[in-house]
Amino acid sequence: MKKIAFSVFTLLYSITIYSQVDTSYFYYNIFGNATEKGAADLYTTQKVYWQNAWFINDYYTNGKPKSKMQFKDAAYTIAQDTLYEYHENGQLAEKGSYNNGYKVGVWLSWFDDGKPNSKCTYKDDSTSKCVYYHYNGEVSAVVEYKYDSIILKARMWDSTGVPSANEYLIIAPTLFGFEDGWKRFLTENMKFPEDEDGKRIKANVSFWIKIDRLGKVHWGDVIGFSHPYLALELERLINKMPLWKPAINQNRPVDYILNLNLSFNSGN
C-alpha cells in the first residue's frame, strides 16, 4: 500500500513540476498561415521551454499530435534530436534525427496505413540518398540529393519493377486532363445560393480539398470567412466531383492538398 501511495505521489509531483514549464500556444491553418484561436481549420503549435531545452509540439484540428521536435535555441531554429511526425489518424508518418540543425542518419516515412513510403540516408551535412516506394512495396525511385533539393542522380521504376523514365518532380493532380478542369466542372454544376432575404450571395471563395492517391476528392473547408450557404454549396459540388488524375511524386501517385479559388459573382 505504501509503495502504491509513493508511486501516486511521484506521479503527482512530476505533473506539478512539468506544469511549471514555460508554455505558449500559436494557431495556424493547413497551409501554415497564422490565424486566431477559434478560426476554421485550426491547427495548434505548443512551444515549451523545459530543463534548458526548447520543444515544439504541433496538433491537428482533432487534437491528435501532428509533430514533435526539440531545439537547442530559444528562437527554435536549430533542431536537435529526433523529429516525429504523424498522420491525422495517429499513424507515424516520419521519423528522423537532427544534430545542430542538420539531418543525420536514416530517416524513415510511412503511408497512413503503416506501409513504407521512403528511406533517406544522410551521408553528411549536404548529401543524401533516398529510396521511395510504390504503395505495393516496389521501389519507385532512388534519388541522390545535395542540400535536400538539388538532384544529383535519379533512377525510376514502375510498380512492377520495370525501369521507367517518368518525371520525378511533383506533378499536381488534374481533372479532365488539364490544370483547371476543376473550374470547368464547378462552373457547369454550381448553383447560386440565396440568403435569408432571397438575395443571391456573391463572393470570391478560397477553399482547400484533398486529392488522394487514387484520385478521390475529399472536402476540406473554406479558408477564412464565407457565408455558410456558400460553404455548403462547395461541399455539395466536391462530393459529386469525378475522380482526378492523382498527383505524382517520385514516380508514384500520392495524396495532395489543393488550394482553390472560385467566384460566385456571375449571374444576376
Image (tube, grey):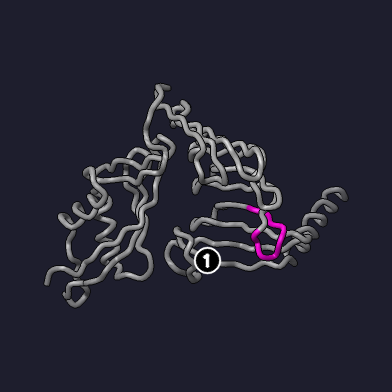
Q: Using the rendered view, name the quadrant where residue 71 is placed.
A: bottom right
Q: Residue furthest bottom?
A: 197
Residue 21 horizontal/vertical position (percent)? 73, 65
At horizontal 71% and vertical 63% (from top left) the residue drawn is: 49
Residue 244 horizontal/vertical position (percent)? 28, 43
Residue 266 seen in the figure: yes
Q: Is residue 114 above or below residue 63?
A: above
Give the main secondary structure of the magenta stretch. Answer: loop
Residue 115 seen in the figure: no
Residue that carries the numbered disc 1 in the rendered image: 27
Magenta stretch contains residue 41? no
At horizontal 38% and vertical 27% (from top left) the residue drawn is: 164
Tag 1: residue type?
Answer: Tyr
Query: Secondary structure beneath disc 1?
Result: strand
Query: Looking at the figure, which quarter contains the C terminus?
Result: bottom left
At horizontal 16% and vertical 74% (from top left) the residue drawn is: 198
For this view, does 2 lie left or right of residue 94? right
Q: Is residue 85 above or below residue 122?
A: below
The magenta-colored residue range is: 69-77
